Amino acid sequence: MSPTSYLFTFEAGPEFPTPRPGQFVNVAVADDLTLRRPFSFAGIPAPGRFDLLVEMRGKGTRALAEKPIGSAVGVLGPLGNEFTLPGADSVSLLVGGGIGVAGLRLLAQELRRGYHRIHALVGARTSPGLLHHVLPSPTGDGEVLIEVATDDGSEGFHGTVAGLLERVLNELDAPARVYCCGPPAMIAATADITAKRGVPCEALLEEMMACGVGACRGCVVATRSGYKSVCSDGPVFDTNELVLEELVRA
Amino acid sequence: MPELTTRIGDLTMRSPVMLASGTVGYGPEYEGVIDFGATGAIVTKTITVEPREGNAPPRLVETPGGLLNAIGLENVGLERFLAEKLPEAAPLPVPIVASVAGTGAGQFAQLAAAVGERDEVAAIELNISCPNVERPRNPVWSDPVAVGEIVSAAREATGKTLSLKLSPNTSDILSVAEAAERAGADALTVANTLPGMRIDIERRRPALGNVTGGLSGRALMPVNLALVWKVAEHVSIPVIGSGGIGDTGDALEFLAAGAVAVQVGTALFATPEAPSEIADGLRNYMEENGFASIDELVGMAREERRTCAETA
Ligand SMILES: Cc1cc2nc3c(=O)[nH]c(=O)nc-3n(C[C@H](O)[C@H](O)[C@H](O)COP(=O)(O)OP(=O)(O)OC[C@H]3O[C@@H](n4cnc5c(N)ncnc54)[C@H](O)[C@@H]3O)c2cc1C
Ligand SMILES: Cc1cc2nc3c(=O)[nH]c(=O)nc-3n(C[C@H](O)[C@H](O)[C@H](O)COP(=O)(O)O)c2cc1C
Ligand code: FES
């Protein structure tokens, strides 16, 4: 999908509940690792199946990539809450940084099916890291629009995807709802920009996870009402709820 | 059919496999994932008198063969535990052991009385060994006098079965174990996590928000197994093993060292099926090797038991 990420399709069977956009699955990637690895559902290619879009990061993601096609892999899910779907008249702005696009892909597919207006803003450090091509293709009628940003200016908007969002919001003529997923600094910048304009914004967060079901309290994020667990209270949070300084520091 | 029933004080369990404190929350979080019906008992997250927010994240970091956690005893506090968490956990088909921690003997007595009075609580585990909230010097868990006072106070406060959870992080675990037995503990849980840390070199700072955390998982197993061996020889109350237990082989080793039951914690994260798999594995082992009850496995690697087996 990019030089460092792969799309995996899992055959989960008819018993497996249909995942909702924003939810994730805990994957037993390797026998010798203490923890499973959480990944966002990135697509439902057919009933009983799901896609994961995985960036190679360390031992666990590499172990997953090295498995032969057809391997049996333990999964626990669907876990977590889901994105709030937009009202009929608003434009959905999907803001994804790097592999964060994976967390928005299922949402984009669902919005596309419902004929919602989607404006996706996809960022990466450099052009080869851009993952905009995994989203539904842009349509001529403007229902699906995709713009990219690179930190080094090698493709699209020169700057961060949050900078691009600011420009898009300034020019937008319709009510908007923002969905974001990516590095903490990007989420904090997006939260700031949307808060100033009173635009509703949800972020899909990442934290180190052990149980995935809210039992161990290992995956917390600071919110205005105390620590919340990303796995069971999230992973989707209203960005107005987050304590942004702590998000960036943690 | 071999009999897996195990007894600790007044707590009767259908399997010697319990779930360790802090890894199953209050129970219902894992409903539909863990087969509670095949589990001996669940030990709840440690409860304190007041609610605790816990430590700043990150709270977890994986290590080879293990896990470091610095949760900081995040819990809802005694009042909400009694009003909400306990009634929610009660319908689960498994006995509930309430884990509690106080700042001193007075709070331990208060906690033991309050949870001990509830029918839903089958037994109580006194946690003096959490490495994430302790005072830096002269920790309670290596102070036999303080431990004796805590256990006595809790003993006076409740008639429920009491197990004291020891820390592996002490040079003289036997004095602490002895003090607890003398003060009226019905059992000892051996043991909690060891302190450790990792550094995130990319960001040049400790990987955990709390700097240090408790090491659990496979890497801890031989350490705590040795402690069970030592403690079981020294006391006459039952010992419950904890530390890196993830499969039937691990559970057998702890039983063979002298534990009457084992707790599975960290292994649940990768393998929530572990408790029922271990129960099945123990049953198979007993069947194949002619054991009729768990009692017969307890201490089977100890010389005194080995001699018995040979002369029998
Ligand atoms: C809700 C959620 C959704 C996610 N969705 C995706 C996705 O769709 N695609 C994708 O590529 N990545 C996703 N991630 C991140 C993914 O979980 C990590 O990249 C992966 O766990 C790395 O494992 P590793 O063994 O390769 O790396 P390691 O070398 O073990 O660790 C590298 C880094 O990965 C992260 N990580 C490691 N173990 C865990 C764990 N148990 N829980 C959480 N983070 C961990 C930590 O930040 C760690 O520093 C998601 C994370 C969360 C919490
Ligand atoms: C995330 C986490 C939280 C824990 N919280 C507690 C706790 O609240 N009280 C306690 O007595 N032990 C706690 N422990 C220790 C476990 O109960 C257990 O004794 C220890 O982890 C060793 O066993 P294990 O390797 O099977 O996990 C915790 C362990 C982990 C991994
Ligand atoms: S991973 Fe255990 S509470 Fe979220």
Image (cartoon, coloured by chain):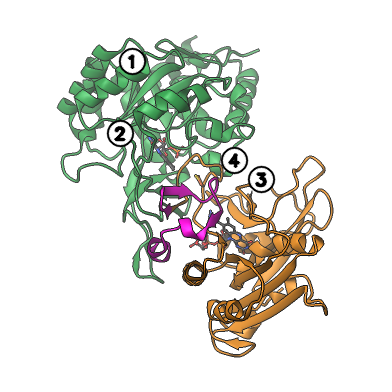
Chain colours: A orange, B green
In space, the residues marked 4 and 3 are separated at their CA atoms by: 14 Å
Q: CA distance from mark 4 to mark 1?
A: 30 Å
Residue at which label 4 appears: B271
Q: Is A179 placed left or right of B108 in the picture?
A: right
Q: Measuring 47% from the left and 37% from the top, which residue is drawn there?
A: B23
Q: Secondary structure at mark 3?
A: strand
- Disc 1 packing (10 Å; few <14; some 14–19; many ≥20): many
Q: What residue is shown with label 3?
A: A77
Type of the residue with mark 2: Glu
The amino acid on which the numbered mark 1 sits, given as a three-letter code, is Asp
**Residue B37 in the image: x percent, y percent?**
61, 22
| Residue closest to the eye, A85 or A56 | A85
Residue behind mark 2: B50
N-terminal of the pair, mark 1 or mark 2, is 2
Count residues near mark 3 (Cα–Cα under 10 Å), then give few for <14, some for 14-19, many for 20+: some
Residue located 61% across and 71% down the image: A95
Q: Position of residue A116 (x, y in %)?
A: 76, 65
Q: Residues within 10 Å of mark 2 (few under 14, many from 20)?
A: few
Q: Is residue B86 above or below residue A225?
A: above
Measured as percent of width and height from the top left, residue A238 is found at 53, 57
Question: Is A230 contained in the magenta span?
Answer: yes
Q: Are marks 4 and 3 in contact (CB under 8 Å)?
A: no
| Discs 1 and 2 share one subunit | yes
Q: Is residue A17 above or below residue A185?
A: above
In the image, which is nearer the foreground, mark 3 or mark 2? Answer: 2
Residue A158 seen in render = yes
Asked if badges 4 and 3 are on one and the same chain, I answer: no
At a point 47% along the width and 21% down the height, the residue shown is B96
**Mark nearer the N terminus (2 vs 4):** 2
Query: Would residue B121 be found to the left or right of residue B280 on screen?
Result: left
